[in-house]
Image: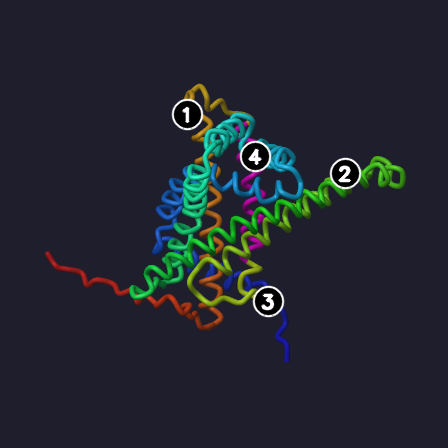
Amino acid sequence: MTQPFSIQKWLSNTWSFTLQLKDAWDEDNCFRLAAALSYYTIFSLAPMIIIVISTAGYFFGKEAVAGQIFTQAKDIIGEEGALGLQNMVQNAYLQHDSFITKVIGGGTLIFSATATFTVLQDSLNTIWDVKAKPSKGWLKFLINRVLSFALVMAIGFLLLVSLVIHTILIALQSFIEQILDSFSVYLISTAQFAVSFGIITLMFAMMFKFLPDVRLRWRNVWRASILTAALFSVGRYLISLYLGNTNLASTYGAAASVVIIIMWVNYSALIFFLGAEYIHVYMLRRGENIWPSKQAVRIIRTEEPHQPH
């Protein structure tokens, strides 16, 4: 027999869940994890974008893909931050003549682009209380790099899908305007937001599912992915609003664009780790078993006894 909904019980469970989530956040020191990830991302961002442009650009043209990326970046981190990001990509772009330098440069590019995902995986393993088996060190290293590169390629594919849908919506705009008149603007904007939100949600879900060394089911990651995507969208609006009313160049000078990028990356890392903690706490409260993958083992945390003075 289904019990009737009780607002008091719901509020009590929500408050209890929030407190447990906060305790897990503090125990894993997610602020430190986000700061470390932001540091690595600054060096990996340009190579990652180059690979995404090359992947999606094969089908849609590199200029179109690059234009879409930097247009989205401008909406998020402002014109100054987008220009700084564009300069980073241009300076990192491979323009080597010989075959050997292209091979070496390409390998360095892939290694740098996947570094962020490797650090991200280590951070997620901290949250899930698992670590790689010492005997599987080199094998785990290779698996991590292949998985990280696959995720970079997947992001490129999702961008390609976004570009295709965006192009279709633009092509249909004149037809929709004839039917719905001025209402078509709101319809197109809503459709574009829904597509963007769906792709961001899918991207977070893939990282939650495949990066940590634990066995997770898809049903466990969707709720946190939607929450993380919602916070991502809210943060996107608030940061763009803040940048529109603040002159960071007067404070940080030439480094303003880098500060803007770090600010956005750090926020994105924080909400991502919040989503991971959400999944972890949610599964613990439901009494679900959390199993490490074949290449990992569980970490048992113990509190050190207090030493009297």
In magenta stretch: residue 229: yes
Q: Is residue 55 visible?
A: yes
Amino acid of disc 3: Ser
- For marks 3 and 2 on the same chain, the one whose residue lies earlier in the sequence: 3
Q: Residues within 10 Å of mark 4 (few under 14, many from 20)?
A: many
Q: Secondary structure at mark 1?
A: helix
Cα–Cα span, label 3 and label 2? 46 Å
Amino acid of disc 4: Ala
Instruction: Look at mark 1 in the image and give the residue it sits on.
Output: 255
Instruction: Look at mark 2 in the image and give the residue it sits on.
Output: 170
Q: Residues within 10 Å of mark 3 (few under 14, many from 20)?
A: few
Magenta segment range? 224-243
Residue 188 lies, in percent from the top left, at 76, 41
Judged from this view, the residue extending furthest toward the left is 309
Instruction: Look at mark 3 in the image and give the residue it sits on.
Output: 6
Cα–Cα span, label 1 and label 2? 37 Å
**C-beta proximity under 8 Å, tags 3 and 1:** no
Residue 89 lies, in percent from the top left, at 50, 32
Q: Quadrant of the image for the N terminus?
A: bottom right
Instruction: Look at mark 4 in the image and give the residue it sits on.
Output: 73
